[in-house]
Structure formats: structure tokens, C-alpha cells
Image (cartoon, rainbow, N blue to C red):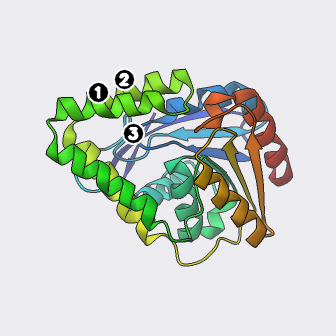
Amino acid sequence: MYFKSSYGDIYYEIHGKNNTTVVAFLHGILLNHQMFKKQIDAFKDEYKLLLWDMPEHGQSVKLQKDFDFAIVADCFIELLNELEIQEVILVGVSMGGWVSQFIAHRYPERVKALAIEGSTPLHVDLKKIAFIFRIYCIMFKLLPWGIAKKIMVKMTEKMELDPDLKEIFKDIFFRLEKKTVLHLFRGVGQEIAKGIEEELPHPIRMTHGEKELKFFKRMGRTWQKENPRLDYREIPGAGHGANTFNPGEYNKDLQSFLVCWK
């Protein structure tokens, strides 16, 4: 289904039961709502699930400018208003974890709780991670697009990702234009460098796969020590994007969090 936002058409899907807690899923960079297909059957009998493609992703509007968390947040709230949804639990994976935190910061009254997977806190200094996004942008600019795409795919192959997710990523990436990828990587780098001014007041479950990057896991453990509202877990046997890598354990862990905030 499509919703016409202030910025253009937004693709979304609704699964599950009406008149129940709404759980909204936010995907990673270059991906789309399909990365949550292993969560639909697990949760549709108990919750109302909102899956969508963020602007500049999937079947949603192409912004023709650098990716902007504020625009994403505004589109999301416009979608909630259209669907007459007042409050949601946000589930964000990878980049979706940062966007989830930004939405909760910008519209705190619309978010009941957050479950963040494969990401980092957004209120801390992320300039080193933002620098990595700038390096990618330099590579995309300097190299012929065909060569840059092959390098990116080879790098993805070496990452601890679910094989199905790798195939989804490769299929999407090879069809994208160079300017779209630059808009995304440059925008995300700029947005996480800015971050948010203060820690969120919401209850948060943060998870990382057991095989996730060590400094991501270190940031998660540090955040747990500093924030009594945050519960940190590791998903055994999983890498980045534990919801696809080990959906059985991830779904079990997510359910243990959702039931607390139904």
C-alpha cells in the first residue's frame, strides 16, 4: 500500500491484529521492509505490525538529496497519523536503530519503547563511524560505478550476515544509481555525526549478534551500565542483523521485551 506524505509516496504494509499494540519495523541502509519477513509470522498473531520502506529506499519516494533523519521521522509520523496510530514500539535494525532513536527523540510522545539491533546509541560521539561513511563516499565518487559496486558486494560477502540478507542486499545494490547511494551514505554519515542532544527517556532493549563488530558490542555494554532503562543482550550464533541471521533466538528475545510494553 502507498501513503502520500509531504515528501512523496511511502510504501508500507500492515500485518497482524487490529486493536493491539503496534510494532513498527525500521530497516537498514540500502535495504527495505523485506528484511523483516522472518518476524511477520512470529508476531502477527499477537501484534499489529507496520512495515515500511523509508524514503530513498525500496518502493518509497526518492528524495533527490542527502538522506535526512528529520524527513524520515516526519514521514513516519505522517504515516502514523494517516493510519490513526497514536503510539508504537519501534524495532530498528542497523541504520534503522539510529533512525528509531531519532524518531523517539523528535516525537517522544509517539514512542512507547524501542528495540534496537545491530546499531549503537545515537547520543554519543559517533564521528569515527561517520568517517567510515565518508570513506565509502570517496570510493563511490572516484571509482567507476561498476567497479565500486563489485568492491561493495565483495566486502558484504566477508561480513557476518545472513545469506538471504546478503542476496537481498546484492539484488538491491546492483539496481541502484550512483547518486542514490551517495545520497544515502553521505546523509547517514552527516546525521550520525550530529546525533541527538540527550539520552532517550524510553525503555530500550539493545541486542547485538554474538559475531557483531566488537566495538558495537562494547558500546552496547557501556550504554547498559550508564542507563537503567536499557537492557542489553547478545543473540547467540548471529552476526549483524540478528533478526535474519538467527530469527528463532532473536524473535524469542524480542517477544520477551514486547510483552513488557503491550
- The residue positioned 70% from the left and 39% from the top of the image is 210
Query: For this view, does 30 lie left or right of residue 88?
Result: left
Whole-percent x, y for residue 92 in the image: 59, 48
Q: Secondary structure at mark 1?
A: helix
Residue 194 in view: yes
Nearer the N terminus, badge 3 or badge 2? Answer: 3
Whole-percent x, y for residue 64 in the image: 22, 51
Identify the residue position indicated by label 3 in the image: 30
Q: Secondary structure at mark 3?
A: loop
Q: CA distance from mark 1 to mark 3?
A: 11 Å
Q: Amino acid at mark 1?
A: Phe
- The residue positioned 21% from the left and 36% from the top of the image is 177
Quadrant position of residue 47: top right
Q: Amino acid at mark 2?
A: Asp
Q: Residues within 10 Å of mark 3 (few under 14, many from 20)?
A: many
Whether residues under marks 2 and 1 lie with C-beta atoms below 8 angstroms apart, the answer is yes
Nearer to us in this view, 165 or 214: 214
- The residue positioned 45% from the left and 40% from the top of the image is 53
Q: Residues within 10 Å of mark 2 (few under 14, many from 20)?
A: few
Identify the residue position indicated by label 1 in the image: 174
Image height check: is 53 above or below 157?
Answer: below
Query: For this view, does 116 lie left or right of residue 203?
Result: left
Q: Secondary structure at mark 2?
A: helix
Nearer to us in this view, 82 or 99: 99
Q: Amino acid at mark 3?
A: Leu
Q: CA distance from mark 2 to mark 1?
A: 6 Å
Whole-percent x, y for residue 204 in the image: 72, 59
Nearer the N terminus, badge 1 or badge 3? Answer: 3
Nearer to us in this view, 4 or 227: 227
Whole-percent x, y for residue 23 in the image: 67, 45
Identify the residue position indicated by label 2 in the image: 171
